[in-house]
Amino acid sequence: MTHISANDLKTKGISAIEFALSTAPEAIVSVRGKDRFVVMDIAHYHYLRECELDAALAQTRSDLNAGRTVQESPEAHLARLDAMNAA
């Protein structure tokens, strides 16, 4: 993964990010020698978000198929949460 120093970002601005992303889908921004941030193209970000949502949907379907769900009214749900917090 490409690295950009905070100083490069400060002096070169967005061109430092554009250059880093020309060779990799993500770039790490380091501040005082420590990795602090990741920058990426918006299309790559949307792809990762879609993957995250697909994984959540798969987990939900797995829970439904395995019977790891509770069907109840909103009132019963809140009462169950209150009981869990009291314990």
Image (cartoon, helix red, strand yellow):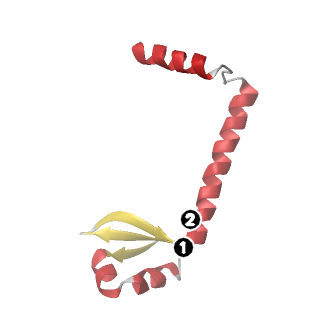
Where is residue 81 shown, x and y percent of the image? Answer: 50, 20
Circles 1 and 2, Cβ within 8 Å, touching? The answer is yes
In the rendered structure, the answer to whether residue 26 lies left or right of residue 28 reads: right
Residue drawn 53% across the image and 76% down it:
24
In this rendering, the answer to whether 16 lies above or below 50 is below
In the rendered structure, the answer to whether residue 54 lies left or right of residue 32 reads: right
Q: Quadrant of residue 12?
A: bottom left
Residue drawn 67% across the image and 24% down it:
69
* Nearest the eye: 43 or 19: 43
What residue type is disc 1 on?
Asp
In the rendered structure, the answer to whether residue 32 lies left or right of residue 14 reads: left
Within 10 Å of disc 1 (Cα), the crowding (few <14, some 14-19, many 20+) is some
In this rendering, the answer to whether 20 lies above or below 74 is below
Residue drawn 47% across the image and 13% down it:
83
Quadrant of image for the C terminus: top left
What residue type is disc 2 on?
Tyr
Q: Which residue is mark 2?
A: 45
Residue drawn 72% across the image and 26% down it:
66
In this rendering, the answer to whether 87 lies above or below 61 is above
Within 10 Å of disc 2 (Cα), the crowding (few <14, some 14-19, many 20+) is some
Instruction: Classify mark 1: helix, strand or loop.
Output: loop
Where is residue 7 shown, x and y percent of the image? Answer: 27, 79
Instruction: Classify mark 2: helix, strand or loop.
Output: helix
* Nearest the eye: 85 or 17: 85
* Nearest the eye: 31 or 74: 74
Q: Which residue is mark 1?
A: 41
Where is residue 64 shown, x and y percent of the image? Answer: 72, 29
Where is residue 23 shown, x and y percent of the image? Answer: 53, 81
Q: Quadrant of residue 63?
A: top right
